[in-house]
Amino acid sequence: MTAAQLAAFQANGGVHPAAMSAVLIGTCLAVLLLWGVWAIRTAYVGWAESRINQRQFLGVIVRFLAMYLVLTYFLLS
């Protein structure tokens, strides 16, 4: 961003763009972690009650980890 754009952003938003970026990335990763905990917990309950097998349960975990790693790579690079 140019100096004029930075000044306009800070004047209108009241925060530095880097700080806003950190907040948005942190919020996105926190929401993903909360969703992952919910998904894994739900899958665990299904596995414990024999509604899904162990392979499906592990599939949920692997898919969540893959999504988290890819999103982390894209957001933090």
Image (cartoon, helix red, strand yellow):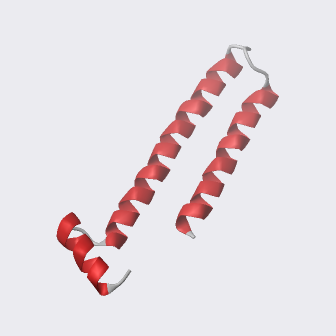
- Residue 44, located in which quarter of the rendered image? top right
Q: Is residue 35 left or right of residue 62?
A: left
Give the residue displayed 38% in from the left and 80% down from the top. 1
Q: Is residue 40 left or right of residue 11?
A: right
Q: Is residue 62 left or right of residue 20?
A: right
Pick the residue in front: 22 or 17. Answer: 17
Q: Position of residue 43 (x, y in %)?
A: 65, 26
Give the residue displayed 57% in from the left and 39% down from the top. 36
- Residue 47, located in which quarter of the rendered image? top right
Q: Position of residue 23 (x, y in %)?
A: 36, 59
Give the residue displayed 59% in from the left and 31% down from the top. 39
Q: Is residue 41 above or below residue 22?
A: above
Pick the residue in front: 13 or 61. Answer: 13
Give the residue displayed 70% in from the left and 35% down from the top. 60
Q: Is residue 18 above or below residue 1?
A: above
- In the rendered view of the protein, which quadrant contains the C terminus? bottom right
Q: Position of residue 26 (x, y in %)?
A: 42, 56
User: Count the marks: how many?
Assistant: 0
Q: Is residue 51 above or below residue 58?
A: above
Q: Is residue 36 left or right of residue 6?
A: right
Q: Position of residue 52 (x, y in %)?
A: 75, 19
Pick the residue in front: 28 or 13. Answer: 13
